Image (cartoon, rainbow, N blue to C red):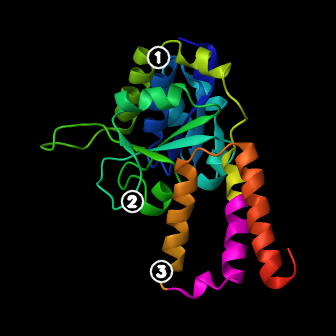
Amino acid sequence: MDKYFMSDITVILADTRHAGNIGATARVMKNMGFKNLTLVNPTPRTHMEAVRMSVGAEEIIERSTIVPTLEEAIRPLVVTYALTKRRRRIRKQVFTPAEAVDGIVNAKGGVGLVFGSEKFGLSNEQTMSLDHIITIPVSPAHSSINLAQAVAMVLYELRREAGIGKRYSKHHKLCEPADMESRQYLYERMTDALKAAGFYSRANADRTMAQIEDIFNRAELDKKDVKILLGVFKQIKKTITGRV
């Protein structure tokens, strides 16, 4: 397994309510050779129960990053995957864990695997903010999966099938990919320009804007792409309003 590839993967647990699931996830991560864990708004009773359930993976919990929002968790990443079992009316590519391996292995930068709360999973808003969806193909007769088990299934597929793809792609990237923070800045400037153009007078403009952002996310923009698009939207706003 390529250590460079493994260090690029971050497991993100959003709104986890049971500290034991955090510990069990840390244990699974160590089993599979992964170490980056981010906790978004976790239960305040996290530490001792999580450590007890981690069984030898305490250092993953100790080094984990804790942030208040999913937006902050994904900001430095290049591509993100929402883990969800629910069917959603969202235009995103949906993969099984095995199908997602190639895209994850060959991503040119940090990858986030985002798991929602035990009871509710990820909200539609959270899922919309991510790039792709991974769904584990379980029996419809009993589709509920323990959080740590879901993490284990995805990381197992990565460990089993990843191979050496990352080592090849690392040397062939043409331009550094745009992280979530730079893309978000682009979307803010795009929103400014479209507001100036009267776009927000349309019905359901917010939903349409989210769909436009999703189009750009699926395009896997690099830093040069973002720079060009920023120039486009700034010029549009300047032409309409006379100011940037």
Disc ID at residue 204? 3
**Whether residue 30 is situated above or below residue 84 in the rendered picture:** above
Disc ID at residue 31? 1
Q: Secondary structure at mark 2?
A: loop
Task: Single out the mark in the foreground, 1 or 2.
Answer: 2
Amino acid type at circle 1 is Asn
**Whether residue 11 is situated above or below residue 197 in the rendered picture:** above
- Dominant SS in magenta: helix
Give how far across and how far down residue 113 sits, in percent. Answer: 50, 38
Give how far across and how far down residue 220 sits, in percent. Answer: 59, 44
Q: Label 2, on which residue?
A: 90
Q: Viewed as shown, does residue 182 lie left or right of 140?
A: right
**Given contact means CB atoms under 8 Å apart, are the residues at marks 1 and 2 in contact?**
no
Identify the residue at horizontal 38%, vertical 48% (top origin).
Answer: 118
- Report the Cα–Cα distance between label 2 and label 3: 15 Å
- Between 226 and 2, the one lying in front of the other is 226
Give how far across and how far down residue 184 sits, in percent. Answer: 68, 57
Q: Earlier in the sequence, mark 3 or mark 1?
A: 1
- Report the Cα–Cα distance between label 1 and label 2: 33 Å
Image: magenta residue range: 186-202
Q: Secondary structure at mark 3?
A: loop
- Between 22 and 184, the one lying in front of the other is 184
Task: Single out the mark in the foreground, 3 or 1.
Answer: 3
Amino acid type at circle 2 is Ile
Let me know if residue 199 is in the magenta part.
yes
Let me know if residue 42 is in the magenta part.
no
Quadrant where the C terminus sits is bottom right
